[in-house]
Amino acid sequence: MLYVKKRGDFRRGVDSFCNVLDSLAKFKSLNYAMKSSPALVAVLAVTGLVALSPSNALAQSTPDCPAIKATLLKPSAISEAEVLAAQKGWGDALVAISTTYDKNEKDGKYDQAAAKELAAKVIDSAYGYNIGPVLFKPTLTTVPQTFRTTRAGALAYFVGGDPAFPGDTGFALKGWRKVNICNAAIFIDQDSASTMGKVMITNKKGEVTTVDKTWTFVKDGSGKLRIMVHHSSLPYVAAKG
């Protein structure tokens, strides 16, 4: 179930976000859009326009990904449900950026501008670059630009197109269609929460890429979770023989 956050500037929030709605699909109303696109719901939640209720949080309990219980030091300002919802929002936003980019692929057209616009909004609302440097180590970066502590570096990694980061081709533009998250552990202490586990990302060919991922979320002054640490790497494969 969804509920709209009560805020005085709701109208301005809707107006400023209409361009994102246009880039995702030509919906006639916000309610219809949310009912028609779970990915859009997640992106709206990431940007803070609507909030996810606990029932929308990621459920983790499969043979390959057993259920875990978060370690929670009380009193804490963050709930486990909020952490799971933030993770799911990140995954669905990644898919939304990718599908925005290649929605007209059959016609041989790719919309990097729309994908970049959406990625910028997701970064601005999901990450804590407005607070300070974010400890972001993406999966596929190399020296001397391994770490992306600035907004510009993060945006270049996700969508490319920045001459200051010539090695970036756009991780979010790789045809991603599904994201599954399997947490090994969650630790919550007051206004911060850290998670570690595996993230399985499926592309449009059905191929799955698995990465080891650590996030630290911090609740800001407005009560929103923001990513302040994001470390991602491919699993180590031992040499044979």
Image: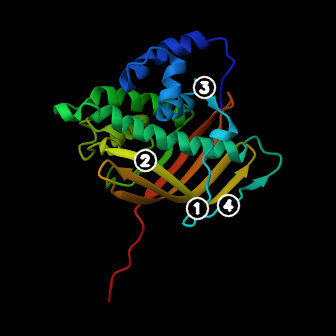
Name the residue type under label 2: Lys
Which of these two is toward me, 19 or 232? 19
- Indicate the position of residue 211 as horizontal and vertical percent values: 43, 59
Q: List the residue tagged with mark 1.
A: 62
Residue at 57% x, 33% y: name it: 131
Which-is-in-front pick, marks 4 and 2?
A: 2
Q: Report, in whole angstroms, how far the alpha carbon at label 1 lies from the one at label 2.
A: 17 Å
- Indicate the position of residue 91 as horizontal and vertical percent values: 48, 44
Q: Work out whether mark 1 precedes mark 2 in sequence or the reverse, and give the earlier one.
A: 1
Numbered badge on residue 50: 3
Which-is-in-front pick, marks 2 and 3?
A: 2
Where is the N terminus found, in terms of image quarters? top right
- Indicate the position of residue 35 as horizontal and vertical percent values: 53, 27
Q: List the residue tagged with mark 2.
A: 178
Left or right: 153 as drawn, with respect to 43: left
Q: List the residue tagged with mark 4.
A: 68
Residues at circles 4 and 2 in contact by the CB criterion of under 8 Å = no
